[in-house]
Amino acid sequence: MPVWIYRKISSMTMPQWFSAWSAKAAIKYLKCLIWLGALIPVSRLIYLGVTDGLGANPVEFIERSTGTWALVFLLLSLSITPLRHLTQQSWLIAVRRLLGLWMFAYACLHVTTYLWLDYQFDWADIVKDIVKHPYVLVGAAALLLTLPLAATSNQRAIKALKQRWKSLHKLVYVIGVLVLLHFWWLVKKDVTEPVIYSLVLALLIALRWLPFSNNRKS
């Protein structure tokens, strides 16, 4: 064991050591739950595809499912900071990156389904669809903004960018607005889901900026 680790552990009181161990264990188990939960939707799609259970329009079913889950993981990642402040459990921040990466993964599946299964990479038809349906362009803009966030979701990038990293990752709020605008334009009649997700995003933004905590380091 390195000397500095030994000194750090030996200098801890029993409550401090137990608290550190509990947080580490909680992070481990919560990350396992996130992985399991994130794999369920895609596993379900595979199962439904094999058993011919995707309905009359399987491509649309896959697009809607992957898009919805990308939005869900986006909102879950945004919930971490206010939840951390409300519960005073600082270890929660350790799972935010994983939630964001799953959001990016489902967003990529969503766009891949559109480009491949829906249009077979026929770029002429894709351009026509974008002109006809502006919500496609808005969705594409949201995905493009996630690229730098996913690329800098590592410790090396955090150390290199320093304070600029926090400014860059505030783009997640812009992404949230664009994704919901994409959703609103996509839905034709029943707007129940867009309304619910919009209210959740508004609440998370309000909680993020309300002065319930003096610590806004993340």
Image: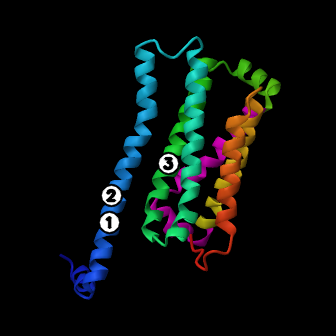
Q: What residue appears at the point 65 percent right and 64 percent down from the top-left corner?
A: 207
* CB atoms of marks 2 and 3 within 8 Å: no
Look at the magenta stretch and give its main secondary structure.
helix
Q: Which residues are magenta?
A: 135-164
The structure residue drawn at horizontal position 44% and vertical position 58%, both measured from the top left corner, is 95
Tag 3 secondary structure = helix
Answer whether residue 171 is visible to the viewer in this image. Answer: no
Query: Marks 1 and 2: CB-CB under 8 Å?
Result: yes
Number of the label disc, if any, that sits on residue 24 = 1
In the rendered view, tell whether residue 194 sits above or below residue 84: above
Mark 1: amino acid: Lys
Report the amino acid beneath label 3.
Answer: Leu
Q: Is residue 155 magenta?
A: yes
Q: Residue at x 22, y 86 (%)?
A: 10
Badge 3 density bin: few <14, some 14–19, many ≥20, Cα 10 Å:
many
**Left-right relation of 73 to 141:** left
**x and y, in percent, of residue 13 in the image:** 27, 86
Left or right: 193, with 69 as reference point: right
Question: Does residue 25 sit above or below 74 in this rendering?
Answer: below
Amino acid type of disc 2?
Lys
Considering the image in quadrants, where does the N terminus appear? bottom left
Q: How many angstroms separate mark 1 from mark 2 (CA)? A: 6 Å
User: Looking at the image, do the residues carrying marks 3 and 1 touch, with CB atoms under 8 Å apart?
Assistant: no
Q: Is residue 210 among what the camera can see?
A: yes
Helix, strand or loop at mark 1:
helix
Which residue carries the number 3 mark? 101
- 176 to the left or right of 36: right
Question: Residue 77 sits in which quadrant?
Answer: bottom right
17 falls in the magenta region: no
Q: Position of residue 184 (x, y in %)?
A: 75, 36
Which residue is disc 2 drawn over? 28
Decide: few, some or many residues near mark 2? Use Cα within 10 Å; few <14, some 14-19, many ≥20. Answer: few
